[in-house]
Image: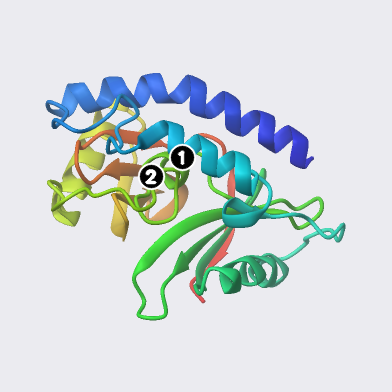
Amino acid sequence: MMRKRAALAAAIVAAVAAVTTGAAWATGSSPSGWNMMGGPSSPGMMSGASAMGDAGMMGGAYGLPGDGQRIDSLAEARQRAAVFADRLGLRVGETMQFDNGYYAELSTTAGRGATEVLIDPADGGVTIEYGPAMMWNTGYGMHAGATTGAVRVSATDATSIAQRWLDRQGRGLSVGNADEFPGYYTLHTLRHGTPVGMLSVNAYTGAVWDHTWHGKFITMSEE
């Protein structure tokens, strides 16, 4: 299952990045110093790739290998996410269950959003979430440590951008509050006030990245 998720992650990063880049150009010019993934240029993609190679997608800074125990509840998913969060000096916030697995937000002890993770129901493996958490997060992703300057998109801007994007899709969905993470925002997509999915908005370019990998929403807990 973890191998399948790793393959899916690679496929999503390769395939969806092109869509995301297009969104960045559609919503405004990409600022100088930013690469085609919608992230900041730094010693850059090469140093990020090297970090991934050293730590490993499934271990180190990017994840926690499974322990072989199946995850069957939000409480169990939260517990596994907490093991990984502890290694980074973080804590677990909102936890969600979808039919493709579990999701959790990690935050600092001061309550600021840090990153997002996925928990594999088959064996409890934890990985930094595909997409924005890996590619856009300037604190805990491939661009960790990059110098970015002040963000150009506020939480209010992100909410408006996300809603306009959804309106163009014609899905009849609305967006929830914009949760801020280093370099981007993540928002729930809602139908009649009930979450059905998520999307993220880049805090520098306004690019939109739909979280297409979760599947159908099942349930969630705030804490």
Q: Examine the image and state in which quarter residue 126 appears.
A: bottom right
Q: Residue visible at 35% across and 80% down?
A: 110
Identify the residue under disc 1: 48
Check disc 2 and give the amino acid type.
His
Looking at the image, residue 48 lies above or below residue 16: below
Position in image of residue 218 (x %, y %)? 61, 54
Residue 163 lies left or right of residue 112; in this view the side is left
Q: Residue at x 67, y 43 (%)?
A: 100
Q: Residue at x 59, y 74 (%)?
A: 86
Q: Nearer the viewer, residue 143 or 208?
A: 143
Residue 83 vertical position relative to residue 175 in the rendered view, above or below: below
Question: Disc 2 or 1, which lies upstream in sequence?
Answer: 1
Question: Which quadrant holds residue 103?
Answer: bottom right
Residue 131 visible here: no
Real-space Cα distance between discs 2 and 1? 6 Å
Amino acid type at circle 1 is: Gly
**Residue at disc 2, secondary structure:** loop
| Residue at the limit of the structure toward the right, as seen here | 68
In the rendered view, would you say 223 is above or below 120?
A: below
Q: Which residue is mark 2?
A: 143
